[in-house]
Every structure is written in C-alpha cells, then in structure tokens.
C-alpha cells in the first residue's frame, strides 16, 4: 500500500520527534508492567511486542513484568476451583497456587516470550523463582477486610510481598540482545511459592536496578482529577495531595503508590499509561505529548 504525502510527512515528524529521546535513553533500563487490555486484545498485543523489540533495537534495556489475573481466573473456573478476593487480592490456597504457577510461569509467560520472538526479538522468560530472583514472604493482612475484628490477621494463603531482588540473572542479560520477561512469583528460604502483585514486582525491580523509567499499563487514560481530566507532569508532593483530598481512590491507588515508591527510591520517572492505545509504550517514551500520566520527583511536563 502506497503512502500519501500527508501520511509520509506525519511518519517523518514522529521519527524526528523521537530522535532526541532515543539518544537520551540509549543504555537506560526501562521496566514495563504489562497487563490489562493490552494483554488480551490481539492488535494491542502485537503492538506492545513491537514496541519492546524496537526499544531494545535502539539501545534501551527493556524488562517486562506481566500479570495474568483473568487468565488465572479462567483456568480456575475450568477446574471448578472457586475464586475469592479480599481487598482485591486473590485468596491463594495450595491448589490455587499450583494453577497460578502453571498459568503465570507457563502459559502467559511463554505466550509473551513467543510474541516478542515472533517480532524479531530475543526474549527469555523467567519467574521470580529462577536464580532466586525474587525473595518473598507471606503478605500479612489485618483490619476491616473481612469478618475478623480490626487488627486480627486475615489469612489469604500464598500471596506474597517482595523482600529482596537478586539482580544477578538480569545483570547477565543487560548487555546482550535478550529481553527478560518476568512472571511475578517469588519464593522464601523454605522454598514456598508466593503469588505477588505484578505492579509491586515491577516497581521494586525498577528501584533496585536504578531504572530510568517504570511504566505501568492500565485500562484507563491515566491519573485523573475529579472532573475526569488526565493529569501529567506530577511531582511527589502533588500526588500526595491528590491522595489526601480523595481525588485518587479505588484501583488507581495501588498503582500510584507503586509509582511513588519507585520515584522516591531513585527511579527517574514513573508513567501510568493507557494500555488500550496501540503502541502506548512508544508514544509515551518517544513523543512530546505521551499517552498517560508522568510522575517525577519534582514534576515536569516531559523528561
């Protein structure tokens, strides 16, 4: 199909606009949390894979951390295993944990690796258990989430939180052509497995690796004010204020908290972007306008 002159000019504009960003971020590590619509829509899946491969091609060091909640739910339904949630966390008994490991570490992880490889990348799939990448511990919940009295512990099974990250495996891949794809499963000193929130894993990886950017894909346009306008160029103080005055509530709060922790921990910028937009990752990194919310320590429109 031949290009019109206007289309060709638009492509040239995008390429020239991206050049200073490519030059600036060559050699930099970018941790991307992949999930939501971008993970189930075929067009978005292919676009995401091309974005990540292109980032690697121009000299960046992308690391993908993925979720898989809907896929886990589907397999549990097929096996007639009931799904229960407390405070948005899946109650994970031993049988459910077996399914989580099979789906996240097997089906979903290998599908993403296959997508990247199909688009001329060299992806390697790992879980947090490989090379003792993610040391975890049982997540302890207390309070009002169930019928227990405030302060009582709520047992949600094999749900974990990150204790530490062993970057040795990732360091080996940093200066190669390989793209790590990480399933958020950790293990403790006794070898028990834990299902960990993928946003939390991505944020902690970005912090420990001293990443240039943390990118969280969502199913919304970004952080919004009370009128529904997307906010960007936010500082830590501005985000804290949005939390304090209840502008940020519900499912956006954990993502924003993850982004804040990463930036406070030394990550240069965190991006909460609309994964429903094709090529959202490239548009956010390599264009002036972007497609979501940028959070930095001091706040700015574009870094």
Image (cartoon, rainbow, N blue to C red):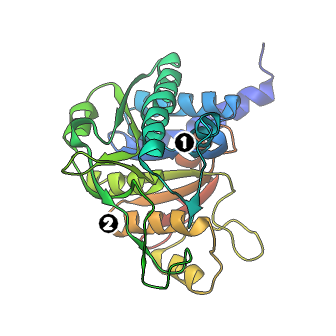
Residue 27 image-quadrant placement: top left
Q: Which residue is situated farthest in the top direction here?
A: 1
Q: Is residue 31 above or below residue 265?
A: above
Residue lying at 46% horizontally and 31% vertically, measured from the top left: 109
Residue lying at 26% horizontally and 31% vertically, measured from the top left: 173
Q: Quadrant of the N terminus?
A: top right
Q: Position of residue 148 (x, y in %)?
A: 51, 79
Looking at the image, residue 194 sits to the left or right of residue 41; the answer is: left
The answer to whether residue 17 of the structure is visible from this angle is: no
Between the residue at mark 1 and the residue at mark 2, the CA separation in whole angstroms equals: 26 Å
Residue lying at 42% horizontally and 34% vertically, measured from the top left: 105
Residue lying at 56% horizontally and 40% vertically, measured from the top left: 72
Which mark, residue 265? 2
Q: Position of residue 171 (x, y in %)?
A: 22, 38
Residue 47 image-quadrant placement: top right
Q: Nearer the viewer, residue 221 or 160?
A: 160
Q: Position of residue 254 (x, y in %)?
A: 52, 66
Q: Is residue 50 above or below residue 184?
A: above
Name the N-terminal-most of marks 1 and 2.
1
Q: Position of residue 268 (x, y in %)?
A: 38, 60
Q: Closer to the observer: label 1 or label 2?
A: 1
Q: Which residue is mark 1?
A: 68
The answer to whether residue 81 of the structure is visible from this angle is: yes
Q: Nearer the viewer, residue 112 or 212?
A: 112
């Amino acid at each position: 199909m031949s290009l019109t002159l206007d289309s060709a000019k638009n492509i040239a504009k995008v390429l020239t606009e991206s050049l200073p960003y490519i030059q600036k971020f060559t050699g930099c590590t970018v941790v991307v949390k992949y999930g939501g619509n971008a993970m189930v829509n075929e067009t978005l899946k292919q676009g995401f894979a091309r974005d990540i491969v292109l980032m690697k091609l121009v000299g960046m060091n992308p690391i993908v951390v993925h979720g898989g909640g809907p896929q886990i739910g589907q397999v549990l339904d097929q096996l007639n295993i009931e799904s229960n949630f407390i405070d948005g966390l899946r109650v994970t008994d031993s049988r459910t944990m077996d399914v989580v490991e099979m789906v996240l570490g097997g089906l979903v992880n290998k599908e993403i690796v296959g997508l990247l490889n199909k688009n001329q990348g060299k992806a390697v799939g790992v879980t947090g258990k490989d090379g003792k990448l993610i040391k975890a511990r049982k997540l302890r919940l207390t309070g009002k989430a169930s019928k227990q009295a405030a302060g009582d512990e709520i047992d949600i099974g094999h749900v974990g939180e990150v204790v530490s990250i062993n970057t040795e495996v990732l360091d080996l891949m940093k200066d190669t052509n390989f793209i790590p794809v990480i399933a958020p499963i950790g293990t403790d000193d006794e070898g028990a497995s834990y299902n960990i929130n993928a946003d939390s894993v991505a944020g902690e990886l970005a912090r420990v690796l001293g990443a240039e950017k943390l990118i969280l894909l969502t199913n919304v346009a970004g952080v919004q004010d009370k009128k529904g306008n997307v906010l960007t160029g936010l500082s830590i103080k501005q985000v804290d204020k949005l939390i304090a005055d209840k502008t940020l509530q519900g499912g956006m709060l954990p993502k924003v908290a993850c982004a804040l922790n990463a930036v406070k921990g030394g990550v240069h910028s965190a991006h909460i972007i609309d994964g429903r937009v094709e090529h959202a990752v490239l548009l956010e990194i390599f264009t002036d306008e972007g497609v979501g919310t940028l959070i930095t320590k001091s706040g700015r429109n574009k870094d």
